Structures are given as C-alpha cells and as structure tokens.
Amino acid sequence: MNPQVASNVNAPSPSTEAGKLATAAGAQSPLLRIRSTGGWRAVDVSELWRFRELLWFMMVRDIKIRYKQTALGIAWAVIQPLSTVLIFSLLFGRLARLPSDGVPYTLSTLVALLPWQLFVYALSQSSNSLVAEQRLIAKVYFPRLIVPMASVLAGVVDFLIAALLTLGAIIIFDVAGWFHFTLRLRVLALPGFALLALVTALAVGIWLSALNVKYRDVRYVLPFITQMWLFVTPVAYASTLVPSAYRALYGLNPMAGVVEGFRWGILGTRTPDWTLIFVSTAMVLALLISGLFYFRRVERSFADLV
C-alpha cells in the first residue's frame, strides 16, 4: 500500500456548496488516496525521508531491547569477539599455525572480527525484522523498508564498542613489544569499509527479509549461510592463502574485501587488492538494487502474509 496525494480530477465545482466545503477542507489538510502498488517500482526516497523519525525510533528501540533484562548487558558486545578470538587463536594460531601476514595472529583475528561481527548481527536482525514486526505491519502503514534498515543501523553501537576493545588490544600489544603500531592516513579508509559491510548486510537482508515473510525456511537457512560465509571470508586466515588466479572470483564475497581493508587500515598489512575491492563493491550494488526492486514488488502483500 502506498499513500499518494490525490489529483483534483472529479473534484466538486467550487461554485457549488459542496465544492466550497471541499475547498475549505482541502485548505486545511491534503486529501490522501491509499492504493496498492504493483509491478517493479523504484524506492520512494522522499517517503523514506518523511518517515526518518520512525527510522530513528525503531533503531533506538532495537538497541535498548537487545540487552534488556540481561545480566551482563552491553558487556556481551565484548565477550562475543573475545571468546571467538581465543578459540581461533588456539585452533588456527597455535595448532594449525596459519600465517597472519607478519602480525600476531590474535591481533589479526580480532581486527578481522570487527567488521565481521557487525555484518553478522546486521544480517541476522534484518532478515527476521519483518516477521518480528508483524503486528505493526498488519495495522499501520509506513514504508516497510524502514524495518530492515533500522535493524542494520542498530548494529553500529556494538561495532563501536568492539572498536574500543580492538584499540585497547593494539595498545597492549604495542606496549608489550609484540607489535609496533603506526598511525597512518590509511585509517581514514576504515569508515568506507565499515559502510561497505553495512550495505552488504542490508542488501542481503532486504532479500532474506522479503523472502522470510512468505517462506519461513529463511530462519533455518540463515545460520547455515552465515557459517558458510565465515569459512569463505579471511577471518581465521590471511587472504594471502588464496591463489592470485582466484582473487577476482574471491571478490564475489564482499566481506573478503572488507576484512582485507580493515587489516590494511589498522595493522598495516599489504595493500588490499583493489580489483577485489572493485568486484566486491559491484557485487554489493547489484544485490542492493535488485533487492530494493524485489522488496518494492512484494511489499504490498506483507500485511496479508506476515
């Protein structure tokens, strides 16, 4: 359903009494006609802007609900990456002895987990967001795209907390002499790589959230998708293990370029393969544009199916 301002066609004549009343009423408030949309339609950006306060409200609400009635509260944003780093360091760093591009394996994994945790949280929340808001969707009209967008943006808070954890680890490693950190201009590229991770989660989340309304199998497939995605993303290993002949193909995984970019921007590892970054960006844009068109095509049925 999409509200649009109705035209003045078939409006009462201003000379009649009914026309005068309609004119007076119209001067106070616009006449709205709510009608369903069909076919492949582009996103109405102006409509999203009008509902920007709702986007902010839902984002803040999701942040508050995430740690409501939890014993450790926001500390989970630190416990999760720390526990993962410890397991990876023991299995892959100590036992398998995987290379880490000349930096401590623990630090390399912690930096890689920074964008990965942001991506996984944003993807999981956005994919289930429409089903979680089924009561609201069935009763009130608003741009449905706001729901997965708010879920994605809510993950930024955990990302900032994990970034402080990473900064603390870098300082400890530098003071202990295990790693020499040098601040360079390349850190300015980190917001761009973080944005790429968010857009990737939003692009895939839009597809999965729309499909989840009709096919509830998505909730069972999603953990499998994220698990397999982790294996093909250089989080537990360095991207240098991938042969150069396959790097362009490897770039079809957008998170590969993001993780490589974070390691380069923070740890000063080798310059990322910009061909891989270009392929990753093109892949994300294709997923996002196609997902937006598909979402707009099927959103009119959300209230009936959810």
Image: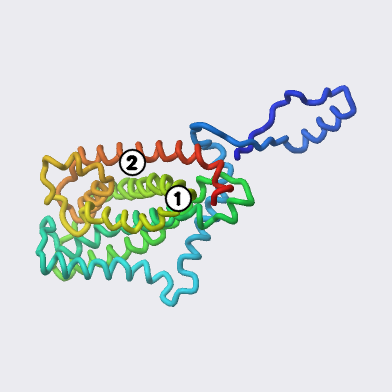
Q: Residue sitting at 24 percent across and 59 percent down?
A: 111
Query: Disc 1 marks which residue?
Result: 215
Q: Secondary structure at mark 1?
A: loop
Percent across and percent down for residue 101 are: 12, 55
Quarter holding the N terminus is: top right
Q: Residue sitting at 26 percent across and 55 percent down?
A: 228
Percent across and percent down for residue 117 are: 32, 59
Percent across and percent down for residue 191 are: 33, 49
Q: Which mark is residue 284?
A: 2
Residue 19 appears in the figure: yes
Quadrant of res 167: bottom left
Which mark is nearer the camera, 2 or 1? 1
Q: Residues within 10 Å of mark 1 (few under 14, many from 20)?
A: few
Q: Residue sitting at 44 percent across and 47 percent down?
A: 211
**Residue 14, placed above or below residue 278:** above
Q: Secondary structure at mark 2?
A: helix
C-alpha distance separating marks 2 and 1:
23 Å
Give whichever of discs 2 and 1 has the lower sequence position.
Answer: 1
Q: Amino acid at mark 2?
A: Val
**Residue 107, placed above or below residue 299:** below
Name the side, left or right, on which 103 lies relative to 193: left
Name the side, left or right, on which 301 lies relative to 230: right
Residue located farthest toward the bottom when viewing the structure as drawn: 71
Percent across and percent down for residue 182 are: 19, 56
Name the side, left or right, on which 177 lies relative to 67: left
Q: Nearer the viewer, residue 187 or 262?
A: 262
